[in-house]
Image (spheres, rainbow, N blue to C red):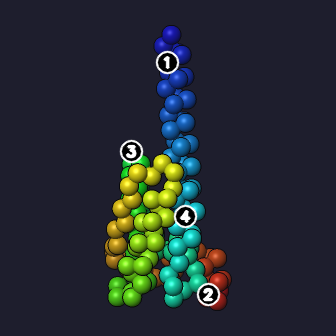
Amino acid sequence: MEEQINKESQQSATEGGNEFLEMEERIVSVLKTVFDPEIPVNIYDLGLVYKIDVAEGGIVTVDMTLTAPNCPAADFIVEDVRMKLDGIEGVKESRVNIVFEPEWTKEMMSEEAMLELGLL
């Protein structure tokens, strides 16, 4: 009996882990559709997303930065992120925190972003 309970617990934990990974993949996919209007690369590949946290109850928190503290498109980008996160099945609430520590540098970009911008 105890062995059966342990197997059920492990299966439940595995399924929960898979659900979390699937949710995180959907979040990353959505973040890759958000662009800084001045740069033809998405915010994820630019390295602007520092942290994605998925809490129980469908609360998603994203810590991100901007290429410059005085970015004129900041409000547009944050609202676009929030709207797209809210559109993901299973997300009940999204929170977007703009942070400037650590400071963003071009080294944070993905290789694809650097190629797109002609930096490689």
Q: Is residue 86 visible?
A: yes
Please name which of the two marks, 4 or 1, marks the residue nearer to the observer.
Answer: 4
Please name which of the two marks, 1 or 3, marks the residue nearer to the observer.
Answer: 3
Q: Which residue is mark 2?
A: 117
Disc sitting over residue 5 in the figure: 1
- Density class for disc 4 (Cα within 10 Å; few <14, some 14-19, many ≥20) is some
Q: CA distance from mark 1 to mark 3?
A: 25 Å
Q: CA distance from mark 4 to mark 1?
A: 37 Å
Give the side of residue 12 with respect to residue 51, left or right. Answer: right
* Quarter of the image where one finds residue 64: bottom left
Q: Is residue 28 above or below residue 56?
A: below
Secondary structure beneath disc 4? helix
- Percent position of residue 118, x then y: 64, 89
Q: Which residue is mark 3?
A: 57
Q: Amino acid at mark 4?
A: Val
Q: CA distance from mark 1 to mark 2?
A: 54 Å
Q: Is residue 109 visible?
A: no
* Quarter of the image where one finds residue 112: bottom right
Disc tally is: 4
